[in-house]
Image (cartoon, rainbow, N blue to C red):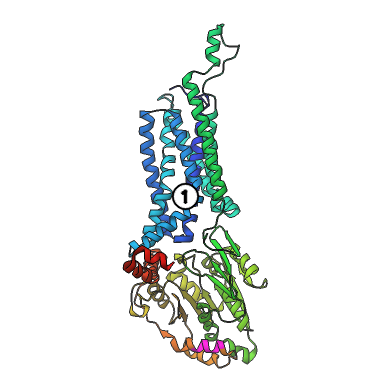
């Protein structure tokens, strides 16, 4: 088949490879942001995304190579790119509904590894097909760009270079430019639009060279007529091209209209704020009594502000025991001394706000890696502008400062997972080195389930965390947070924590807070490690976390499963 003139210029073919490589990486990063609000952004989810995409690309390479040998028609390749672009454009319209539908089905069908299976199924259904089609680009272009065996190495190498450069740009641009600026939905639409425009440019380009009067040899009227009038086959092809272009543009336009809404929690009405940062999906919801921050659609509340200034009813109340263990009230009564508190994982400042409400003699510093969360904290959660917040990774911050603190709170969850570098023996040693002689570390341990008992030695993620901390600190005590999946852990190398807590409570004048602290004192239990240690070299927190999440999901849906078992789908629909 004769090449279209646009293909005789290899630059267009190289640019096709460039934009295909760029779009593959952009879709991969977009996939992580689309899945994160539902399944987290853990290493396991990333592994699933990368694995399924590599499967799609490998199959596309095989298929594209065979098609290029069997039917070397560039129209077929650019037709596949159009289909891929429209599929990618449809992801913001349908992707979140598909993910939730998959979750709804699997939550009743599987008893373990729910997030792994659901994330894998979502990737296979939503992302594999368009990336399979883009995987056909490289072998097809290799066929069209190679003119002879003498220069095929150079040509293939140039194609690979353009693909790699495109992939590099497609890696950085979504993360640092498009997702923070316009969100995940528009990011899919932008890169889909680029692929569509490239394919349309190919199809609307002239199918044959235009001859002018400078060509050698006179032409008869009949010959000139043959060159200026399309044949019947060409007229059919041009009509098909017009229909294809118009249809694809209309479909893309509809995707832009219906897919521009980047709401992941589309069932929520009247959200105060919904957006994305470099690190997180962010959602702020206001109720008559509180402001709530969520970074994950499916799992809970990350931060809360109680408008009337009362206790939150969450783990933050239990964590308030740490300043009493550092004898904050006694030190204030004795000499007006102030204590220094560091919060690793500041969030929207719930703990800092609670400290400022109930203690007059605390200096609070926070470390939060996501500066957009800090902005929300000041805007919606009454975090004072005077509160010092450093935008940094918690462990990196400790490595950079020499200051010692009376209380260090570790609450550095990323959506529903723990960063491995803030769960290891080396990290907790670093925390200990930044505590004063009688300093107290308080750690929020999430993802606790009634099916796992930390005191029984079950090898859950909480057991590993508690054991690791016990290997670093002389004394560790734990308290259950009533009505939640959390536990609070307190650790020190100083005097007895329970004694210090009881002594300092005596100076508290707020009745509600005093009752809360008495509850903590009465339910504190000592913890002895069982030897399960997390280190920088070996900290499988993602696998342990997934195991724990399965237990939480099992607890949460057991009621609905019983309804389904007894009454079927009709019973669930009536319940809803």
Which residue is situated farthest in the right direction here? 386
Closer to the camera in the image, 368 or 546:
546
Residue 548 picture quarter: bottom left
Q: Taking 462 as reference, is 14 above or below it?
A: above
* Magenta stretch holds residue 514: yes
Relative image position of residue 148 (x, y in whole percent): 42, 24
Q: Taking 447 as reference, is 99 above or below it?
A: above
Query: What secondary structure prevails in the magenta region?
Result: helix
Closer to the camera in the image, 130 or 178:
130
The residue where tag 1 is placed is: 28
Residue 436 picture quarter: bottom right
Identify the residue shown where x is 50% and y is 33%. 244
Q: Taking 481 as reference, is 12 above or below it?
A: above
Identify the residue shown where x is 39% and y is 82%. 527
Residue range in magenta is 512-518
**Quadrant location of the N terminus in the rendered image:** top left
* Magenta stretch holds residue 521: no
Closer to the camera in the image, 514 or 235:
235
Q: Is residue 285 visible?
A: yes
Closer to the camera in the image, 41 or 229:
229
Report the side of 76 relative to 530 (left or right). Answer: right
């Amino acid at each position: 088949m004769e090449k279209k003139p646009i293909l005789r210029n290899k630059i267009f073919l190289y640019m096709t490879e460039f934009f295909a490589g760029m779009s593959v990486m952009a879709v991969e990063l977009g996939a992580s942001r689309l899945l994160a609000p539902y399944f987290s952004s853990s290493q396991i989810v990333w592994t699933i995304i990368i694995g399924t995409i590599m499967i799609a690309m490998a199959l596309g390479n095989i298929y594209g190579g065979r098609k290029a040998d069997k039917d070397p028609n560039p129209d077929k390749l650019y037709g596949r790119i159009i289909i891929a672009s429209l599929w990618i454009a449809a992801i913001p319209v349908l992707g979140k509904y598909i993910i939730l539908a998959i979750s709804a089905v699997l939550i009743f069908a599987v008893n373990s590894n729910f997030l792994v299976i659901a994330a894998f199924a979502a990737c296979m259904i939503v992302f594999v097909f368009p990336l399979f089609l883009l995987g056909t680009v490289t072998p097809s272009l290799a066929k069209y760009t190679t003119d002879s065996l003498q220069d095929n190495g150079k040509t293939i190498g140039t194609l690979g270079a353009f693909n790699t450069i495109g992939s590099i740009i497609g890696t950085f641009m979504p993360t640092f430019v498009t997702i923070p600026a316009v969100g995940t939905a528009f990011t899919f639409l932008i890169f889909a639009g680029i692929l569509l425009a490239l394919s349309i440019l190919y199809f609307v380009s002239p199918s044959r060279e235009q001859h002018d009067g400078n060509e050698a040899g006179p032409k008869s009227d009949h010959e000139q007529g043959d060159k200026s009038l399309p044949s019947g086959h060409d007229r059919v092809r041009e009509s098909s091209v017009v229909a294809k272009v118009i249809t694809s543009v209309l479909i893309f336009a509809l995707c832009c209209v219906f897919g521009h809404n980047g709401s992941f929690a589309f069932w929520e009405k009247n959200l105060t704020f919904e957006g994305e940062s470099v690190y997180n999906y962010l959602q702020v919801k206001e109720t008559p009594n509180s402001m709530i921050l969520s970074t994950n659609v499916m799992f809970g509340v990350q931060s809360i502000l109680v408008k009337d200034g009362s206790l939150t009813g969450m783990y933050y109340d239990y964590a308030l025991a740490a300043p009493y263990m550092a004898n904050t009230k006694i030190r204030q009564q004795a000499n007006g001394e102030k204590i220094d508190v560091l919060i690793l994982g500041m969030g929207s400042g719930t703990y800092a706000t609670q400290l400022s409400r109930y203690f007059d003699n605390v200096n609070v510093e926070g470390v939060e890696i996501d500066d957009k969360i800090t902005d929300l904290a000041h805007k919606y959660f009454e975090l004072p502008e005077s509160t010092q917040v450093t935008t940094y990774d918690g462990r990196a911050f400790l490595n950079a400062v020499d200051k010692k603190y009376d209380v260090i709170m570790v609450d550095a969850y990323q959506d529903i997972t723990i960063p491995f570098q803030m769960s290891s023996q080396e990290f907790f040693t670093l925390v200990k080195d930044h505590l004063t002689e009688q300093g107290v570390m308080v750690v929020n341990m999430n993802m606790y389930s009634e099916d796992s008992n930390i005191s029984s030695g079950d090898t859950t993620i909480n057991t590993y965390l508690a054991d690791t901390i016990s290997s670093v600190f002389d004394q560790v005590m734990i308290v259950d947070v009533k009505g939640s999946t959390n536990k609070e852990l307190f650790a020190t190398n100083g005097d007895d924590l329970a004694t210090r807590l009881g002594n300092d409570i005596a100076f508290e004048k707020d009745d509600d807070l005093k009752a809360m602290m008495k509850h903590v004192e009465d339910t504190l239990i000592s913890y002895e490690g069982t030897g399960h240690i997390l280190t920088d070299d070996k900290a499988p927190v993602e696998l342990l976390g997934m195991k724990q999440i399965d237990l939480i999901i099992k607890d949460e849906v057991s009621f609905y499963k019983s309804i389904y078992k007894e009454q079927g789908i009709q019973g669930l629909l009536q319940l809803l």
